[in-house]
Amino acid sequence: MTRLYGSIEAGGTKFVCAIGDDSFSVIEQTQFPTTNPQETIANCIAFFKPFAKDLVGLGIGSFGPIDIDPDSATYGYITSTPKPGWANVDLLGGLRNALKLPMYFTTDVNSSAYGEMMARSGVDSLVYYTIGTGIGAGAIQDGQFVGGMGHTEAGHTYVMAHPTDIENGFTGVCPFHKGCLEGMGAGPSLEARTGIKGELIPMDSPVWDIQAFYIAQAALQATMLYRPEVIVFGGGVMAQAHMVDRVHCQFVELLNGYLPVPDLKSYIVTPAIENNGSATLGNFALAKAAAEN
Ligand code: ADP
Ligand code: ZN
């Protein structure tokens, strides 16, 4: 009997749907822009329907905030997102009604964290950050996601301002907190400081070390809070290949020798799986877990 697993990476910009075989190799994949919820959910269903006979589970990693408490009346909903049309949308319910499969519903960054853990044998504690349009993180301890009433929101912790930002009066762009980690360190802060989109800023711009200062603070928080074996930084901003070295330098200064940490080259890293394939792999494994539960 063929056993297939489904993955939905539900992003604010695009959705990526994939089918994996028993060894979690991708055998079919598609992506489409995130338009309105009805159309977007219908596109997901249309992709999976032809495989319904062999699909045994579906893993969904979604942008958020989302409700991941199975006992909650709004379990499976995207809750308070500022993305127009998507607040209070029952994403999981829409999929379950049409596909009738065991499903695992979590955050996009949890899915990526899970995939990155799987890509590293022997690792069972890891934190995955995305540094993109926003900042979010998924943390795993003992192979389980960290979270209580809901998922964590590691992008919205307050950070220490860089002296240059103080000098220039740059106070951050988070619509909720201004100068939180996301407000100071996500992609849009690069454009807010320089007037230029991150992907077009020259490599010798002083803004990169400012950005690295905030990303290093994220690594410091993850170290202090969770003591993980690995911290992975993905997302658009980390496509700057020089960034991870800059983060290493600033992390050393911030940590100031307080704790022993692994060699930084294996401790603070970019994703082991390219093109955000970590989320897809993580979703396949979570789909399998849901099917076996
Ligand atoms: P999203 O977070 O929306 O899923 P991305 O991870 O691609 O998508 O992040 C998009 C953000 O990252 C934007 O603010 C964009 O300007 C910035 N960005 C994308 N590519 C780069 C790059 N090569 N260098 C710096 N910033 C980038
Ligand atoms: Zn914030």
Image: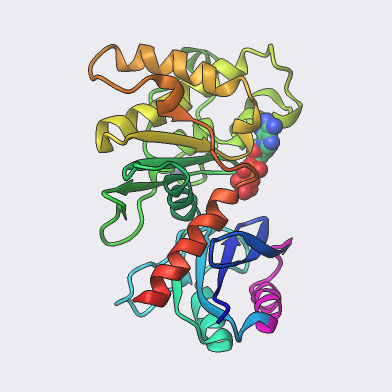
Q: Quadrant of residue 67?
A: bottom left
The one nearer the camera, 292 or 96, is: 292
Locate residue 266, reporting x and y percent: 43, 26
Locate residue 73, reporting x and y percent: 35, 80
Residue at (43, 41) in percent of width and height:
120
- Is 271 situated above or below 36? above
Look at the image and name its color scheme. rainbow
Q: Answer whether residue 197 is visible to the viewer in this image.
A: no
- Is 270 situated above or below 30? above
Locate residue 39, reporting x and y percent: 71, 76
Residue at (53, 56) in percent of width and height:
281
Q: Quadrant of the N terminus?
A: bottom right
Q: Which corner quadrant of the figure contains ligand 2?
A: top left
Q: In the image, is residue 48 part of the stretch drawn in magenta?
A: yes
Task: Give the farthest residue toward the right.
Answer: 200
Locate residue 37, reporting x and y percent: 64, 73
Segment colored magenta: 31-50
Q: Quadrant of the C terminus?
A: bottom left
Figure label count: 0
**Main SS category, magenta section:** helix
Residue at (52, 13) in percent of width and height:
164
Residue at (60, 47) in percent of width and height:
276
